[in-house]
Image (cartoon, helix red, strand yellow):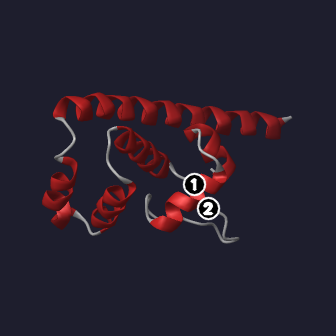
Amino acid sequence: MNITEAGKLTSLTPNTLRYYERIGLIPPVARNKGGTREYTSKDLCWIEFIKTMRSAGLSPETLIEYVALSQLGDTTLEARKDILEPVSYTHLRAHETRHDLVCRLLLEKKKKIKNEKLKRMDK
């Protein structure tokens, strides 16, 4: 899906999504041959994770570090765990549950948008 659709699904503007990617708050988004960002379900879940962790009190700088570590793979699990440790377990679980729900809803919206596009193409 393109940046406009991703923005609608995440309630963020395209400019905000570009900014988040530019500063490393979300991992790099794949681009098509024309250079247009193509957001996947994984990208949408990252965006929701960042929004959730921000509302749980983590700073953008801390989350940028977390994202950078995640790009390095499983060898950084302990370091990432240490980053999330200051967030209270109860608070984190509540946000994690919300995060899972939001990701599921985003996937459903994505399917709905895709189906609507297919219906329009069939006309």
Q: Nearer the viewer, mark 1 or mark 2?
A: 1
Residues at circles 1 and 2 in contact by the CB criterion of under 8 Å:
yes
Position above or below: 109 against 51? above
Find residue 3 and report its horizontal and vertical position in percent: 64, 53
- Residue 2 visible from this viewpoint: no
What residue sits right under mark 2 in the picture?
37
Badge 2 amino acid:
Arg
Question: Which residue is more in the foreground, 17 or 37?
Answer: 17
The image quarter containing residue 7 is top right
Using residue 44 as the reference point, say whether residue 38 is left or right of it. right
Position above or below: 94 against 13? above
Can you tell which mark lies on residue 17? 1
The residue under the point 51% across, 58% down is 20
The residue under the point 31% across, 63% down is 65
The residue under the point 66% across, 36% down is 113
Question: Which residue is more in the foreground, 60 or 68?
Answer: 60
Badge 1 amino acid:
Leu
Using a 10 Å C-alpha cutoff, classify the residue at mark 1 as few (fewer than 14 neighbours), some (14 to 19) or many (20 or more).
some
Q: Callout 2: helix, strand or loop?
A: loop
Q: Quadrant of the C terminus?
A: top right
Mark 1 vs mark 2, CA separation in Å: 10 Å
Considering only order in the chain, which callout, 2 or 1, is on the residue closer to the N terminus? 1
Using residue 46 as the reference point, say whether residue 111 is left or right of it. right
